[in-house]
Image: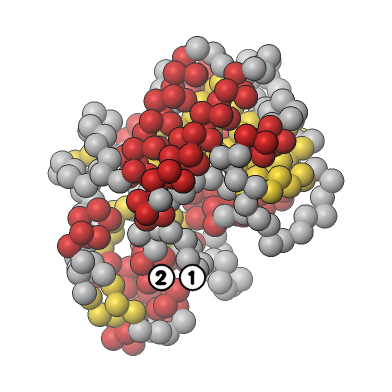
Amino acid sequence: MNIIITGASGFIGRRLVDCLLGQGTMDTMDTSGSANEPFRSLVLVDMAFDQEFHDERVRLVRGSIADPLVLRDAFRSPADCVIHLASVPGGAAEKDFELGLDVNLGATMQMLELLRRQTIPARFVFASTIAVYGASLPPLVTDATPMRPVLSYGAHKLASEILLQDYSRRGWVDGRIIRLPGIVARPPAPSGLLSAFMSDLFWKLADGEAFTVPVAPEAKTWLMSVGCCVRNLMHAANLLSEAVAARRDFTLPVLRISMSEIVDAMASMFGSDRRRLVTYAPDEQLEAVFARFPEMDMAAALKAGYTHDGTVENLVRNALAGRDPSIAL
């Protein structure tokens, strides 16, 4: 079995790779009844890697997925499963439209074309985004809610979703689309994400440092820990082809929580003094895009086997699990 992961050196990609290498298999159950097939090859694609892999199953491909030569190298052997995480995120795609278009849409199209030439359709797990919905949402988001992205990043992702649905309809790939919410807690580093403040809040309070939140304390957002995100990606990859034939796209179940609820949970874990470290300076534009999320009807996604973190307290523990080994996922 040959698995390809784009964005493998990123925040989510690293955790996914660790999970796969630790597990050693991918559930490939189908109508023939086979299951838990060990993978022979794990192709990791990203701009750069700052870690070494002493595992004969791992092959690293360095470079931009917008480069056709890089993709041809990555896909030189037929793929059984592709997990596509790489992207130019919201803020960076707004600053550089061409780069965002080339990576977010153009590279996805190139990958689908390479996979179209295969004899056996590959499973293609596409990490989409809640940014496809845009900013003006109804009081309840359902499966029927229109998608009206207000950022180029969301538009690129939505266009990619439509293409993947069509390639799947034609039988060229076996697509699975999951729309990710805010994933926490990303390490403090430049990421190009306009929503980075949500992860920064976790790290600053965990370290006992003051932090100014650029949205109101009662502002509500949709969040998920990186560990929970990885479990959902694995679930999407493992679903039977028959199970996704009727519906391939899901917005992942989320926790809808306010900034003050996160602060309260952090205070419960690290001490009540954490509340005094937080000030609020709402940015109207930022809040409109990232912190006015309504309720979500998650019934279909939950029935399909996708999950959320359960409680705010679990979210905090899971988000900080990589910081403190005593905090379990």
- Residue 252 is drawn in which quadrant? top left
Viewer-proximal residue among 283 and 126:
283
Return the x and y of residue 123 as percentages of the image width and height: 59, 27
Viewer-proximal residue among 232 and 151:
151
- The mark that comes first in sequence, 1 or 2, is 1
Counting other residues with Cα less than 10 Å from the Cα at mark 1, is it few (<14), some (14-19), or many (20 or more)? some
Return the x and y of residue 270 as percentages of the image width and height: 42, 81
Return the x and y of residue 205 as percentages of the image width and height: 40, 78
Return the x and y of residue 76 as percentages of the image width and height: 74, 30
Q: What residue type is labelled 1?
A: Pro
Residue under the image location 65 percent in, 47 percent down: 63
Q: What element carries label 2?
A: helix
Q: Is 31 placed above or below 20 here?
A: above
Q: In this view, does 177 lie to the left or right of 234?
A: left
Residue under the image location 40 percent in, 37 percent down: 157
Viewer-proximal residue among 117 and 83:
117
Residue under the image location 47 percent in, 25 percent down: 164
Q: Is 195 placed above or below 68 here?
A: below
Residue under the image location 35 percent in, 59 percent down: 194
Q: According to the image, label 1 marks what residue?
A: 188
Using the rendered image of the protein, determine whether residue 48 is visible from the camera's viewpoint.
Answer: yes
- Label annotation for residue 200: 2
Residues under numbered marks 1 and 2 in contact, where contact means CB atoms less than 8 Å apart: yes
Which residue is situated farthest in the top direction here? 170
The N terminus - image quarter:
top right
Q: What residue type is labelled 2?
A: Asp
- Residue 301 is drawn in which quadrant? top left
Number of marks drawn: 2
Q: In this view, does 88 lie to the left or right of 120?
A: left
